[in-house]
Image: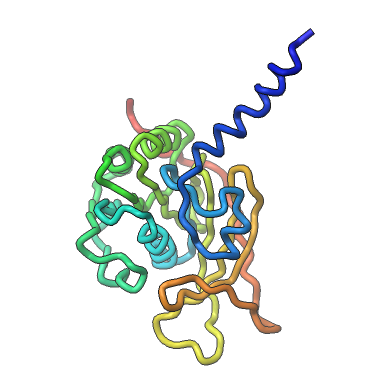
């Protein structure tokens, strides 16, 4: 007969390990934190931020990165082009001197750059514009983030066919019409949590105002953006080993 105590330990130990693994978190907002099993966004791991407009994804990932309590840590932005404007992110709490921009030539260079940035102990966050990553590559990024404590945000397009194989949370951020009386510089977003390890999907509407996300109730007749459907993994981005 199997030992009941041993069976119980085998069931409980993975849950305890998950609590220890995601002990470091940052607050997103009161309402969103309450909907996450970690009561905040876990650090030292990799998340995906999808958006129809890359600007929305960059803004959301940047405001989260700015909340990481490591003011000396650099923030690395990795993409296949040079169209990155850090001055536009000042309103999200990120000074330009904290950014390091790396423009890569191909998908292998991008995968290697993200891996090395996540391994660096002087880096607090990595934002990478990518189209796809297979399970092996995602696992390597995740282990690198866990080892150094850096947090990764993979920025993807909801309209693209490939996808990211494995992350801790997956978000979809899209612009929605502002309410009457809104001022310039207050973006309104539909925030969809489409996947959360150990949690459930959820949706919120929020506005970025006075350095914080504020939830609001949409007036009658305002359309509710639906999370985009994923088409599966069509062309995984593999890293040579």
Where residue 64 sits: x, y (%)?
A: 42, 59
Where residue 44 sits: x, y (%)?
A: 41, 43
In the picture, the quarter occupied by the C terminus is top left
Q: Residue furthest front?
A: 5
Q: Residue furthest bottom?
A: 181
Q: Is residue 105 left or right of residue 166?
A: left
Where residue 99 sits: x, y (%)?
A: 24, 58
* Residue in the foreground of this view, choosing between 6 and 192: 6
Q: Is residue 240 visible?
A: yes
The picture quadrant where one finds residue 61 is bottom left
Decide: is 96 above or below 91. above
Decide: is 120 above or below 153. above
Q: Residue furthest left?
A: 97
Q: Is residue 12 left or right of residue 210?
A: right
* Residue in the foreground of this view, choosing between 225 and 120: 120
Where residue 109 sits: x, y (%)?
A: 27, 41
Residue at left 60%, top 77%? 216
Decide: is 172 above or below 240. below
Decide: is 235 above or below 176. above
Residue at left 43%, top 63%? 60
In the picture, the quarter occupied by the N terminus is top right
* Residue in the foreground of this view, choosing between 139 and 96: 96
Residue at left 40%, top 64%? 63
Q: Residue furthest top?
A: 1
Q: Is residue 79 visible?
A: no
Residue at left 66%, top 83%? 219
The picture quadrant where one finds residue 65 is bottom left
């Amino acid at each position: 007969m199997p030992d009941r105590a041993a069976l119980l330990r085998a069931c409980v130990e993975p849950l305890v390990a998950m609590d220890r693994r995601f002990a470091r978190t940052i607050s997103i907002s009161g309402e969103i934190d309450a909907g996450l099993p970690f009561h905040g966004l876990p650090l030292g791991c990799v998340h995906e931020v999808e958006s129809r407009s890359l600007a929305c994804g960059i803004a959301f990932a940047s405001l989260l990165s700015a909340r990481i309590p490591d003011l000396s840590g650099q923030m690395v932005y990795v993409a296949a082009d040079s169209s990155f404007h850090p001055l536009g992110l000042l309103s999200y709490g990120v000074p330009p001197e904290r950014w390091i921009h790396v423009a890569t030539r191909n998908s292998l260079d991008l995968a290697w750059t993200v891996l090395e940035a996540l391994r660096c102990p002087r880096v607090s966050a990595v934002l990478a514009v990518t189209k796809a990553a297979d399970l092996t590559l995602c696992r390597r990024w995740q282990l690198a983030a866990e080892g150094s404590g850096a947090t990764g945000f993979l920025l993807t397009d909801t309209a693209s066919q490939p996808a990211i194989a494995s992350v801790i949370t997956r978000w979809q951020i899209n612009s929605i019409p502002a309410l009457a009386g809104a001022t310039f510089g207050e973006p309104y977003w539909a925030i969809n949590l489409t996947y959360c390890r150990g949690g459930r999907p959820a949706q919120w509407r929020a506005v970025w105002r006075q350095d914080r996300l504020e939830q609001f109730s949409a007036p009658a007749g305002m359309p509710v953006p639906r999370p985009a459907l994923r088409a599966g993994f069509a062309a995984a981005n593999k890293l040579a080993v």
